[in-house]
Every structure is written in structure tokens, then in C-alpha cells.
Image (cartoon, helix red, strand yellow):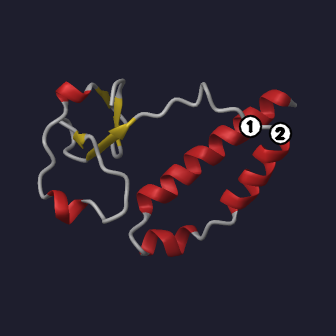
Amino acid sequence: MKGPHQCDNCRKTWWLRDLDGIEDFFQRVEAGSVVPSGQCPGCRALCYPRVSDKNIKVTIPEAKSLLELLQGVDREGGIQAGCRRQINHYDAIAYRLRDLLRQEA
């Protein structure tokens, strides 16, 4: 994928050509999850394509509904089940939605 790739741990951004190969791939990636782009050369965590929200269009009612839904996610249960990365993504989406709603107010 073209564009930058971001480390899921240290949040540094890398180009695909700069990423390392993934060590112990099948022990680190769950079946059905997003396939990582590579491994961070800095902290050795997994990196994923960075998604831009510039082209995402959402109405205010849709943003409010999605924010409500994300706030209802069971974070403790999810973290205990090993879904920390997914919970972090939910939190990032919720943060961006709150930011968009503040701008509209």
C-alpha cells in the first residue's frame, strides 16, 4: 500500500521500504485480523497502513450515533481478550469524532 505506515506501539511513521520483516508472524497476527505491513525498525512492534480521514464524509447525526456505539464498547473485556489494538482503534475513532463534533459546534 502506498503512503506511510504507522507503528502500533510507538506511533512512529515509516515508509514500506523502511519496515523490517515480521518476526514470528503466526504467533503475532490473529486469523481474520488486519494484516500488518511490517515490523517497526525502532521498537519491533507491528506497523499498519496509515489511513487518512480526509475523504471520510459523515453527517453530524451519524457521528453522534457512532460515538455512542463506540463509548459502549467493553474495553476491559476486550483488553483481557487480547483485543487491545482494536480497542485503541475504537478510541482513536471516538477521539476524531469528538473533535469533528466540536468543530461543528
In the rendered image, residue 94, in percent from the top left (x then y), is placed at 65, 47
Q: Which amino acid does label 2 sit on?
A: Ile
- Packing grade of label 2 (10 A; few <14, some 14-19, many >=20) is few
Question: Is 47 situated left or right of 23 in this image?
Answer: right
For label 1, the SS is: loop
Residue at point 60%, 25% (across, down): 54
Check if mark 2's residue and mark 1's residue have beta carbons within 8 Å: no
For label 2, the SS is: helix
Q: What residue type is labelled 1?
A: Val
Question: Is 20 situated left or right of 55 in this image?
Answer: left
| Cα gap from disc 2 to disc 1, whole angstroms | 7 Å
Question: Is 39 situated left or right of 33 in this image?
Answer: left
Looking at the image, is 8 positioned above or below residue 82? above
The residue beneath circle 2 is 60
The residue beneath circle 1 is 58
In the rendered image, residue 96, in percent from the top left (x then y), is placed at 64, 38
Quadrant in the picture for residue 27: bottom left
Residue at point 85%, 45% (across, down): 61
